[in-house]
Amino acid sequence: MKKLLVILLLLLVFPQSVLAHTGLESSSPSTDETLQNPVTEITMKFNTELQPLSTFDVTVNGSDKVPIDKVTVSGATLKGILKEPLTKGTYTVNWKILGEDGHIVEKSYSFRVDAKIPETTTHGQPAPKETPAAAAAAPDAAQSKQAPQESVSPSGIAAVVGVLFLIILGAVLMKRRNS
Ligand SMILES: [Cu+2]
């Protein structure tokens, strides 16, 4: 009984261990970014470590899935290499991660790519090469901060209700024993 009360007390003192889920901190490409260069990989940084089953997929213009070669999880980073570079369209990254606390969190964000694809059918003439200046000007790999958009999930509410129930149950049992 004493042990149970200690656990309940700890849950009350550190409620964030029950309520705070893992969330996306930054990504490359970032949310709503428009890129002028083809995108070859997607990297997401989260605010806690991720568990191995975490993954994501990418859709283009709200429908077709884009093939991803490999998704890797390393610490708090989720990274995927695309089979073919993304060149034109609105891409949506749908991530589904297993956080440090064992909760599944799933959300999505979008970015746009409007890359100039070199012409290859100009009668033997080589395609115009991109100048280094143009390449440097592209806002590639920007790690921009995002406002946390996390909401309390039903599992978080269930955890709080469960804890409250246990406290009331504990109090009732204690009272019975004392009387
Ligand atoms: Cu959680």
Image (cartoon, rainbow, N blue to C red):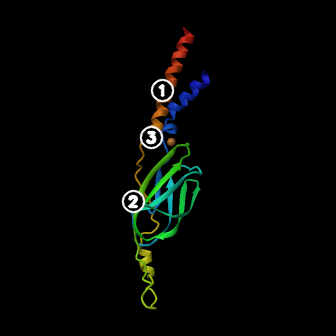
Q: Nearer the viewer, mark 2 or mark 3?
A: 2
Looking at the image, residue 67 lies above or below residue 133: above
Q: Secondary structure at mark 1?
A: helix
Q: Which residue is mark 3?
A: 153
Front residue of 56 and 26: 56
Q: Nearer the viewer, mark 1 or mark 3?
A: 3
Say which residue appears at 53% left-offset and 62% top-offset.
Answer: 80
The residue carrying mark 1 has its beta carbon less than 8 Å from ligand 1: no
Percent position of residue 106, x then y: 47, 49
Q: Which residue is mark 1?
A: 164
Looking at the image, residue 46 lies above or below residue 21: below
Say which residue appears at 57% left-offset and 24% top-offset.
Answer: 5
| Quarter location, residue 114 | bottom left
| Quarter location, residue 121 | bottom left
**Left or right: 70 in relation to 127:** right
The residue carrying mark 2 has its beta carbon less than 8 Å from ligand 1: no
Disc nearer the start of the sequence (2/3)? 2
Q: Secondary structure at mark 3?
A: loop
| Total numbered badges shown on the rendered structure | 3
Q: Badges 1 and 3: C-beta atoms under 8 Å apart?
A: no
Disc nearer the start of the sequence (1/2)? 2
Front residue of 26 and 52: 52
Q: CA distance from mark 1 to mark 2?
A: 42 Å
Q: Which mark is residue 62?
A: 2
Q: Which mark is residue 95?
A: none
Q: Amino acid at mark 2?
A: Gly
